[in-house]
Amino acid sequence: MKVLNALKKHNYEKPTPIQAQAIPAIMSGRDLIGIAKTGSGKTIAFLLPMFRHILDQRPLEEGEGPNAVIMTPTRELALQITKECKKFSKPLGLRVVCVYGGTGISEQIAELKRGAEIIVCTPGRMIDMLGANSGRVTNLRRVTYVVVDEADRMFDMGFEPQVMRIVENVRPDRQTVMFSATFPRAMEALARRILSKPMEVQVGGRSVVCSDVEQHVIVIEEDKKFLKLLEILGHYQEKGSVIIFVDKQEHADALLKDLMKASYPCMSLHGGIDQYDRDSIINDFKNGACRLMVATSVAARGLDVKQLILVVNYSCPNHYEDYVHRAGRTGRAGNKGYAYTFITEEQVRYAGDIIKALELSGSSVPPELEQLWGTFKEQQKAEGKSIKSSSGFSGKGFKFDETEHALANERKKLQKAALGLHDSDDEDTALDIDEQIESMFNSKKRVKDLSAPGGTGAGATPGFTGATSAAGLAGLAIPSAGNIQKLEIAKKLALKINAQKNLGAEAQDVMQQATNAIMRGGTMIAPSVSAKTIAEQLAEKINAKLNYTPVEKLEEERQAAEQAESIKRYEEELEINDFPQTARWKVTSKEALQRIGEYSEAAITIRGTYFPPGKEPKEGERKIYLAIESANELAVQKAKAEITRLIKEELIRLMLRQVGSSSNEYCMSGKPLCLAEDGRRPVAHFDLCSTPANKFYPPSPPTAPLQTSLSHLTAPSQGPKPAPCQRQVAPAPPRVPQRVPARVSSRPSLKASDKPEDSKKKKVPGRSGKRGRPAGTTKSAGYRTSSGRPLGTTRAAGFKTSPGRPLGTTKAAGYKVSPGRPPGSIKALSRLSKLAYGACTGAAFPYSAMHKAGDANTKEQQANETPKMALASSVPQFLVSGFPSARNQKTPPPSSITTAAPSSMVSSGACSQPDLCQGDRQSDSVGALPLHGSVPPYS
Ligand SMILES: Nc1ncnc2c1ncn2[C@@H]1O[C@H](COP(=O)(O)OP(=O)(O)OP(=O)(O)O)[C@@H](O)[C@H]1O
């Protein structure tokens, strides 16, 4: 009833087609992929079933995390969904928190601590939150409903590792739903890994421009574009709001200035703008305070502005999906809209996608565009080149310009490598990393057999013999401290066998006599053989001939095998000395060791000494290594796999950073990114995982091309020493050898240079304060507030400036620059680095470790936390009206609902990527349940 009232209040009179079909399907408890055109109301389609789902759960208790998590690719979209969600959550008494990057984390932490049933988030900040305050801010233990909005984008470059990391830490029998207007098949296959037997609801075409959008494409010369824009604006501006899309941040700022000069008040929105300003720009645009906005594709998805009448693609979109989403900012919720696209002859390679979009949506293709494309195709054919579709998801990623495109490709390859997904063309990258890690580990394995004094060390390697290897009985004649313990065990075994056989001392067998001799410390003499032993041996011979095994012997063998098994010890050593410092930190910190130990149930110790590059250990010394030990071979393998994963993740992060630095990247001083003296980038630079203040190093020599080999990360630099940097205030940390105690269990005592960054709290004198505040000044010293406003002024007082924008200037004056970045400089590469960040933080909470870390009742608790399915009877009547049989049917009936191929179909060739389609979860009871059933408890 409360939902119904809210629907009425916001004039939602009847469900849109996607809502009518997706809502009952989700309420039946199934995982779902929902595809429908832009502006068709997908948000409500996943929100309404979510409220029902949450209301069926027991209330949250103190310290418990949310019931539902909604993930989106952009901050603006996260805010928009939160707003939409609040329309319903307030009357229902549910709490929503929006967790997104670029803004103060403390407010979000405070909100989360108060408790929230729903979190709407961007994945990167969500990972931060999960790791914050040792997981005490929020957790995923109560999450049973997960939404991935704009799912294709979320599984495109950049977000996938983060999304996966979050989803993998939610209980496996969760309900997961995904929505988008575009969903290329390749992306869908990837996304299906987190779904369980999903239904697919597709309304209209798969990736088609909404039919309410009238599309126009104009082939035009670059220098005539602005005049044409003014002509179009003159026609449409007074009818509603207008958004103009450009390809780059600097183009957005330049066009903004030109439009201001032409007396069009406008704003610009792009990734280089401070998040506080981005939020207020969106607000102003949505409420009509400003009706003209120049934006990059950051505003292409999800943005819902009711009165938006016109979209102008001032720069031609460089992939199909981008075109569909940009055009979809208008013509929403049944309203009419217009989209104009400028394309120059130089951009002819994008013409194919535009033609495809026009054709699929039933619009006419202008003859000059067709002609341009035809000529291009012929040219390509003559040159023997093939023409590919520039879908954003066929390995090309989300392009800004050619350089960024190349960098994005490299990033994508590395991310795929991290996830173990290989394309034919990037297979070598993944293999390279795995092989190189394995070879750098220089792994040494051994199995210690402690079941008998003469036990052999299987797979023993040089340097591993000694106590455990049986060097013959003669070798055992001088018992060492090590073998006394083992001999003791052997003795007990022998005594036990004798007791079972009821043999006297005179009937001791050969081994027992040998043991006694050893324990006495003397040399072994020839064993005396009793008549009973001889009789037994004879009996054994007869039994062997008759192929008969006495029952007692069988039992005895079983017990012996059990005993032997229980005292086997598996060991493996992984050398980590030559990995980059941060990679070593990742696996040697106290928390990491503890976590890996808990997860794998193996003991991990740090041994040896760190040797810097070029130094070799002397005799008797060993380079730093991790020793994994367990009585269970599987535990050792698990620990090794986790260590490898952590190292790989860190190496990939470092390589991604290298990708970012292989172009003009700006450090906070506004100068090109500086490298450390050894040619590496300063560790803390853009590294949001580490807490120390930013380091400033001398400007780099010309950047080297990207290398996917690990050698450049580990080998010392040969390059010339760069000139001193004006802002250099903190020298690179000295690389000194350090000794690590021979056996350190969970608390390694590492020296400063090998300690995790966050443990170094020392402030370097003279280092600048936060947000570019000069050292020594504080906020209260009147310098400025955290958002760049002079102290004492309020936003309302008209001082709402971004950091760096001169006071009194307006956003529209084009001064909106991020701190330290010169106006007009692009920040896309730092954004790439930030995206890479997910690869580094997310590892902190493997599912099992997280659940183990909780209290002892975790499993019991989880069993009680069964996600109950929402009942179809709760579907608001108005929603069901367009869908009358929804209440009584087990599966939604309309023919437009296509149920996704079950695994059996997949394996029979229904899908080209069966391995991906089958998903990780083999069995899922949710999908198989009838409409009114309930999900079995998770245990
Ligand atoms: N049943 C309904 N009746 C009327 N308006 C609706 C209904 N459902 C949603 N809307 C409105 O339609 C607009 C578009 O909805 P929404 O943003 O959910 O679309 P979308 O499909 O998610 O679009 P995109 O693919 O661009 O993200 C919103 O303004 C929303 O309030």
Image (cartoon, rainbow, N blue to C red):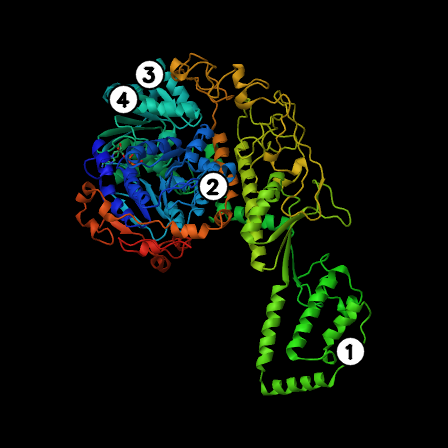
> Label 1, on which residue?
527
Gap between marks 4 and 1 measured at Cα: 107 Å
- In the displayed orientation, state which residue is furthest to the right: 522
Q: Give neighbour class at mark 2: few <14, some 14-19, many 20+ (Cα, 10 Å).
A: many
Residue pictured at 36% horizontal, 13% vertical? 261
Q: Position of residue 16 (x, y in %)?
A: 22, 39
Marks 2 and 3 close (CB-CB < 8 Å): no
Measured along the vertical axis of the image, is residue 814 above or below residue 5?
above
Residue flagged by tag 4: what amino acid is it? Ile
Marks 3 and 1 close (CB-CB < 8 Å): no
Ligand 1 rendered quadrant: top left
| Kind of element beneath mark 4 | helix
| Tag in front: 3 or 1 | 1
Which disc is residue 265 wearing? 3
| Kind of element beneath mark 3 | loop
Residue flagged by tag 1: what amino acid is it? Pro
Gap between marks 3 and 4 measured at Cα: 16 Å
Gap between marks 4 and 2 measured at Cα: 38 Å
Q: Earlier in the sequence, mark 3 or mark 1?
A: 3
Q: Earlier in the sequence, mark 4 or mark 1?
A: 4
> Label 2, on which residue?
412
> Label 4, on which residue?
232
- In the displayed orientation, state which residue is furthest to the top: 808
Residue flagged by tag 2: what amino acid is it? Lys
Left or right? Give the position of 619 relative to 675: right
